[in-house]
Amino acid sequence: MKTRIITLALLFFLIFAGANLSAQNKTYSGDYGGTLNLGIGIGGYSGYYGYIGRTMPIFHINYEFDVAKNFTLAPFISFSTYRNQYNWKNNYYYYHETIIPIGVKGTYYFDEILRANSNWDFYLAGSLGFAVRRSSWDNGYDGDRNYYRDGNPLFLDLHIGTEYHLSNRVGLFLDLSTGVSTIGLAIH
């Protein structure tokens, strides 16, 4: 677990260092970077978490920066927690799990190709990362503690989305994904 966190910290450092270098050397006007995206959504059957057996609420945050014309990278972190009741030897116990997906989302904007109105952005994206999972059982449970550990911590998701700009500084977005779909607020 500590190795994953150290690896992630190094990954974010390299991404931000690369962003600073590309921002200093770029010869174009980036239109999409410098955006903080705050979203809420639902997920759980696939994507970051493996099979959980139900949907659950997710809180998501990322920060986009320009890498090339019409292309951004966005390091992100999400948070979700849930609990399930489990019957073991005629007693009910709760299984609790907290899931924190961490990764990078690469986004290509199709506004120029689609000749979209300046109030709209349209994109396709992919996200790559891993999920840090912490689980616990109620006191007294002495059964199989690996019962709910089906998911792979690594994930790759595809996204399609849009943003409507309420002003130059604020927009509303909808991101549909193979993992977690979100709606939220974009702050430019």
Image: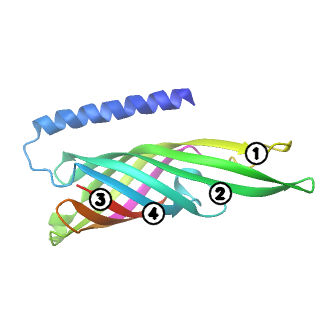
Residue at screen point 26% across, 64% down: 171
| Residue 142 painted magenta | no
Q: Earlier in the sequence, mark 2 or mark 3?
A: 2
Q: In the rendered structure, are the residues bearing label 4 and label 2 in contact, judged by CB atoms less than 8 Å apart?
A: no
Marked residue nearer the N-terminal end (4 or 3): 4
Badge 1 marks a residue whose secondary structure is strand
Residue farthest right in this picture:
90
- Asked which colour scheme the image uses, the reply is rainbow
Q: Which residue is mark 3?
A: 186
Q: Which residues are magenta?
A: 150-161
| Mark 4 or mark 2: whose residue is earlier in sequence | 2
Residue 151 seen: no
Tell which tag, 1 or 4, sits nearer the viewer: 1
Disc 2 to disc 3, C-alpha distance: 29 Å
Q: Is 159 within the magenta?
A: yes
Amino acid type at mark 4 = Ser
Residue 40 relative to residue 27: left or right = right
- Which quadrant, please, contains the C terminus? bottom left
Residue wearing tag 1: 137
On the rendered image, what quadrant is the N terminus found in?
Answer: top right
Left or right: 140 with respect to 156? right
Disc 1 residue type (three-letter): Trp
- Circle 2 sits on which residue? 52
Q: Where residue 153 sits in the image (x, y, percent)?
A: 56, 43
- Callouts 1 and 2 close, C-beta under 8 Å: no
Q: Earlier in the sequence, mark 1 or mark 4?
A: 1
Along the polypeptide, which appears first: circle 3 or circle 1? Answer: 1
What residue does disc 4 label?
181
- The label number, if any, that marks residue 170 in the structure image: none
